[in-house]
Amino acid sequence: MLVVMHNHATPEDIDRVVKTIEEMGYTARPMPGGTRTTVGLIGNDGRVDGSRVEALPGVAEVIHVSKPYKQVSREWREENTVVTIAPGVSFGTSEIVLIAGPCSVESEEQIVDAARAVRAAGATALRGGAFKPRSSPYSFQGLGKRGLEFLALARQETGLPVVTEALDEEGAHLVAEYADCIQIGARNMQNYSLLRAVGKMRKPVLLKRGMAATITDLLMSAEYILAEGNDQVILCERGIRSFDTMTRNLFDLTAIPIVQRLSHLPMIADPSHGTGLRDKVIPMARAAVAAGADGIIVEVHPTPDRALSDGGQSLYPDQFARLVTELRAIGTAIGRSLATPAGTAATVGV
Ligand code: PEP
Ligand code: MN
């Protein structure tokens, strides 16, 4: 339930609404807006009788949120939530954010080279896994803390903020110390204790759609993070399992406009895991931007043939550079532009 206050409501009126909600056994979350304050009621599972609150002075209207993912829904908040991971790098504005880098951090040289290359091409943020969720326990599992240190070094070299995955709660605290945004991967989308843990942190979270998750499942998982008080959540389409073996996953582009209609959170897309095939990444990245994605996360490796993970879907740096030029043109056609990191000249780290 949302309690919309009149624009002339006094702080005492708002206080009274908060106290009443608390007396009813729920939690109140006041949200000051440009012209008026809204007080959200959380902690309920089902419809709440709003008559007690409705009658209070200063209350303009009581809105019942029909969606189960209520804080995530556009009913709860009409305007886009802007998620800022570093100065000048914000998701949910007219700017499109490009996150690029290798699947895994493999060495200091590899991640710094990758960061320089994607920065030169026009990327706005750096990706690279230090903790890798692999199908086989015998595959490369990532460099762990050392990988995080290399990422921090690459950020220092290029000015690019860092997005990297956490696999568990302990790892999330470590990742939060080094990264600008914590990625929760497809396999962990429904790891509710991990979602709660990152919800308690004050770090932006990139939440990827699970490979067998519906769009509603994705939004419900995001609700876990917002329910703990962290609304800095970026959602990501990365492909879902299908019966067709032509591609690694079925890249569900429709999820982009659907999520943007249902939620105020930014929505980006990952055409690398979405397709699993280098030559399919480029057309699907173009398509995702055309479909309205607030950003793209794409795997780029200085030497994909030698990559320790996902080499076959990683772009060569020059392919990525061409893609950025194309995305810029597509963005212009739909009234958007590509984000550039603040305070870093175009030549930094090149
Ligand atoms: C990744 O981004 O490296 C990754 C493992 O992605 P996903 O969780 O989407 O499979
Ligand atoms: Mn990967």
Image: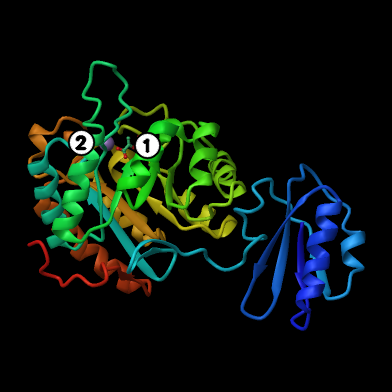
Out of 312 and 218, give the one closest to the viewer: 218
Where 154 falls versus 248 (above or below)? below
Asked if residue 146 lies left or right of residue 61, the reply is left
Residue 250 visible in this rendered orientation of the protein? no
Q: Which residue is mark 1?
A: 166
Out of 3 and 135, give the one closest to the viewer: 3
* The N terminus, quarter of image: bottom right
Of the numbered discs 1 and 2, the one sitting upstream in the chain is 2
* The C terminus, quarter of image: bottom left
Residue 92, quarter of picture = bottom left
Asked if residue 207 lies left or right of residue 60, the reply is left
Disc 1: CA contacts within 10 A as few (<14), some (14-19) or many (>=20): many
- Say which residue appears at 61% left-offset and 66% top-offset: 78
Where 208 falls versus 93 (above or below)? above
- Say which residue appears at 41% left-offset and 26% top-offset: 243
Disc 2: CA contacts within 10 A as few (<14), some (14-19) or many (>=20): some
Residue 146 is labelled as 2
SS class, disc 1: loop
- Say which residue appears at 53% left-offset and 45% top-offset: 200
The quarter of the image that holds ligand 1 is: top left
Q: Residue 127: percent from the left, percent from the top?
A: 26, 47
